[in-house]
Amino acid sequence: MNHTPRRRIDLVQSPEFSSELESLPLEDLRSRRRICADLDTELSYYRRLLQGRLDLLAFEVRRRSGDEQRTLLEALPEVLASWTAGEPGLPERRVAVEIPDLPAQGRRAVDRALADDFLARLPEMDDAELAAVQHRLAEAEAEVSRQRRSVFEASDRLQAELVRRYRQGLPEGPATPAG
């Protein structure tokens, strides 16, 4: 039985998505590249949300240990500006500064991690709870980063096929055997 992935990330991560590209029509290649671009925007947005929360918690850990004298509110602009750098291990890619059309909140780890309103209870959290929240956010961020890498890999293969076709003058369709 053929299983059709329900989520775009499952589709992009399936081996069929970026294999045998030379046999696909140009419009299918472009469509798959758009899927990758849209998914990259979504995953990048999630990653920024997670990283911002991780940075807030890291600041709170430093504050509690005495390494930081400012309040979170005083340091907030600096804390939130610190995570604008690129993701380690990934090529720099320009990412839209827009809120993507996000799927409905579901059962994904990223949804659960982002649903936790820990800031409201931060003053009452003990160190163990703070560490547990950090751990959940870090795991969700790592998964989003792994997904982004797979999207980049698929996108790069699609782009390489498009470039190959344009260089060889075959932009309209798949390679055809000489006859």
Image: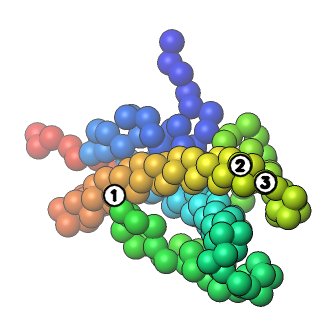
Residue at screen point 55% across, 27% down: 4
Q: Nearer the viewer, residue 91 or 142?
A: 142
Return the disc, 3 or 1, that comes first in the chain's sequence: 3
Kindly identify which residue carries mark 1.
156
Residue 109 at what x, y percent from top left?
Answer: 66, 42
Q: Nearer the viewer, mark 2 or mark 1?
A: 2
The alpha-carbon separation of the residues under discs 2 and 1 comes to 42 Å
Residue type at mark 3 is: Asp
Crowdedness near tag 2: few (<14), some (14–19) or many (≥20) residues, C-alpha within 10 Å = few
Q: Do the CB atoms of the residues marked 2 and 3 lie less than 8 Å apart?
A: yes
Q: Horizontal and vertical percent for residue 160?
A: 27, 59
**How busy is the neighbourhood of tag 3: few (under 14 within 10 Å), some, or many (20 plus)?**
few
> Can see residue 59?
no
* 36 w.r.t. 3: above or below: below
Rendered residue at 11%/40% (across/down): 179
Is residue 161 rendered to the left or right of residue 3?
A: left
The residue to which callout 3 is attached is 126
In the picture shown, does residue 30 fall above or below 178? below
Residue 62 visible in this rendered orientation of the protein: yes
**Mark closer to the chain start, 2 or 1:** 2
Q: Amino acid at mark 1?
A: Asp
According to the image, label 2 marks what residue? 128
Answer above or below: position of 18 versus 159: above
